[in-house]
Image (tube, rainbow, N blue to C red):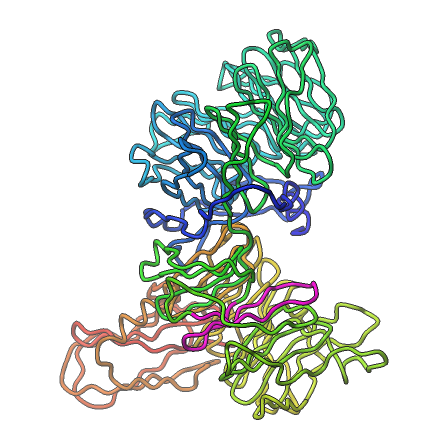
Amino acid sequence: MRKILLVLLLLPVLLSAQSPTRSIAVAGSLLTVEEPISRPGQAGYEFQEMIHHGHYDMERVLDFDSLNMAFLGNWPMGLSYSLHYSGMENIFLVGSGGGVIVVDLSDPYNPEQISVVKSRSLVDAIDYDPETKRLYLGAYFSGAEIWDMTEITAPVRLARIPTESYPRGGIFADGNLLYVMSVADGIYIYDISDLNNIPKIGHYPIPSSTLIWNSAKDGDLMFCAANNSCRIVDVSDPYNPQMVGAVAGLTSGVAAAGGKLYQVSYNFGLKIWNVSNPSSPQLLGQLPLTGSPVRVDIKGNHAFISSNTTNPGGGVRIIDVSDPTNPQEISTYTDYAEYIAVGDNVVAYTGGSVCSYLDISNLSDPQMTAIMKLPTWTNNVCVNGNLAFTGSNGFRVFDITDKSNPVQTGYHETAGDLVAVSGDLAVYIPKSMTAANPVNIMDISDPANPFKRGHYTAPVMTYDIVLKDHYAFIACWWDGFRVVDFSNPDAPTLAAHTFGWVNGAEPGVEYCFVQALDIEGDYLYLIDYQPFEDQDTKGLYIFDISNPENPVFVHRFATLNAKGKDLSIQGNFAYIADDLGGMEVIDITDKNNPSIAGYVYTPDAATAIDVDGNYAYVANYILGGVQLVDISFPANPFVAGYYKPSGVFALGVTIHGSNAYIADGIAGFQIYDNLIITDINEAEKIPAPLIRVFPNPASTKAEIVFNVDKTTFCEASILDIHGKTVCTLYKGSVTAGNKKFEWDGQSSSGSYLPNGLYLVNIQLDDVIHNSRLILIR
């Protein structure tokens, strides 16, 4: 199922293109603005486990759901899937992943970034009302968001509306009504007169076999660009919208103004329709266009069409439509263009990782004025103290002192994806299946001004990284792994290379496909999910790296069940992220004889994992967000918390204290808090008596022993992971000395409680002390 959802998401993905002429570096210093912390909503977030006409049946409201985890903040920037002109003073709203960059183009040669709006998910649709100074966003999993832009340098979110399907086809505000176009479920209409109570008042369904990626609104008519036609819906009665007409043909983009519909597609170019009588649209004129027209915007008597191809015909096409029966092309600015918006003498268009600006004061000769680089994909986040590092169309450094508002403080144009930090140096590599990838050494002694020291070029792909002292261990997939010595950061060298494929090598014995790796002590662990059925390479591989320049193969554990995507080692256990949907635990106490210790299922594919203390944190792709797994007893791991979904894709996870950093692909990264750890840490701040729980884990009965130094009031109780008291063992006065209570796994009412993690709660007067207990029958 997730593959189908991936297709839905990536259908309009843009290809990057190089543009000539002058440019300015704006994205290197993205401004972020404080946003109120959002806490988990009450509405559940669920997918029905079925597919209907190639899409999820959405029978419940899309929303965020959580257990024992809270959203703290995010840096949401990424590829562009939206663009809008505000209608005032050349202020443009540039979608960048889950963010919107507010740009002033009064001087198109010197764009000024004013602020950044930080949505909770990928921004696919933007509308702005200059009168109310409100910004409206269609934001994928988040739904519809409403922002106050009265103070344009400090946007404030006013409301978020969980929607009943993906709000990716368009969003339009008109007075107290908000129209949201679902990509697969039609038009939803909301009454926004009271932002504390926003009811859905109307819905026009469009079959899920018809994808609506673009739409337009003109008066009481909405135009829905679909894969087989453009449907016309009358919304004059918002409680009962009705389809009143249609124009045939695959439609990529639409615009509407003055009773006319402008329809573009790669297979016919531009068509102009008279829709003053929507039940009987009349074709006025047509202009065949080469390339791949995808979007259209109208300004006065001119249509501006974007074409997303690098072949002839790509770029911005300017069409004179003053005579709709005979549209004429005035000029073309050749480039790669996807989303387009037109202001006063300025055109903005995005093409994946860039937003470009054209001066159109002379329509016959548009001129490039500036190019703004945008972030792209965030695959992982490295955290070191109050700084976070990642690669996203450049090396980026963030101040994360305020978790609700990560602020980018440093940038370098060096391309890459994965970061690992050692002192004042960061090793920085692409996550790439292509060849000749650099292993970059970045100097981060001044985090505000990182720079590249040197690099070693791996002749093959680079896919994962882990450090030991001044050695970087690089996963190179079919080429095994390489060890790079960066003791001289200006000239790193290859120290070792092993387990790579060569002609005639024996699979699983002399080579494997290194997907991911981790280090514990003097041992390197790596996993191979066996990408090719005819090559027996699947397993967990162990190497002795006491001498990093001479790794020694120790053992291959071939009976791994998981389709391993990532691993994290802690103590005597390896924790494997299973692409099939779970986490497998391997006992590695005996390096020559590992064994399967436990397994836990997760809602979606486990893409990455990090372990710290009693918890494993699993990046769980789309459906599962971040899953918090209790590993106090590794043989019986269980999901103790979650926050789902993330903004778009949960691709990477890094743990720092009680916080989980989720790399979210095209929507930057989010920060979540483990509320269980927070509660326990608060208890641990006060002196605690020695509490012994034996046996632990317990199957039938547990003894709880603690010491009291004076006569005092005592309450001994058992709490579940939500903090609810499930059994009170004792309540009353106790004298000094050792005290012992027994618990048989039953609640106060005498019912047997389910297996899992419980908290032993000992209150002495006004002081509370805790210990953990695992119940397994």
Q: Is residue 733 left or right of residue 105?
A: left
Q: Position of residue 316 (x, y in %)?
A: 62, 30
Percent of width and height locating residue 83: 51, 35
Q: Residue at x 46, y 49 (%)?
A: 27
Question: Can you see residue 730?
Answer: no
| Residue 210 against residue 477 in the figure, above or below | above
Quarter residue 315 falls in: top right
Q: Is residue 210 magenta?
A: no
Q: How many tags in the picture?
A: 0
Say if residue 618 shows up in the picture.
Answer: yes
**Between residues 219 and 442, which one lies in front from this camera angle?**
442
As drawn, 339 above or below 466? above
Residue 471, horizontal then vertical, whole percent: 54, 82
Looking at this rendering, what residue extends furthest in the left direction? Answer: 711
Write down the quadrant of residue 671 in the picture.
bottom left
Q: Is residue 429 magenta?
A: yes
Displayed quadrant of residue 578: bottom right
Left or right: 607 with respect to 310?
left
**Residue with the most extreme top position:** 277
The residue that appears at 62% across and 60% down in the rendered structure is 605
Q: Nearer the viewer, residue 193 or 495?
A: 495
Which region shows up in magenta?
419-443
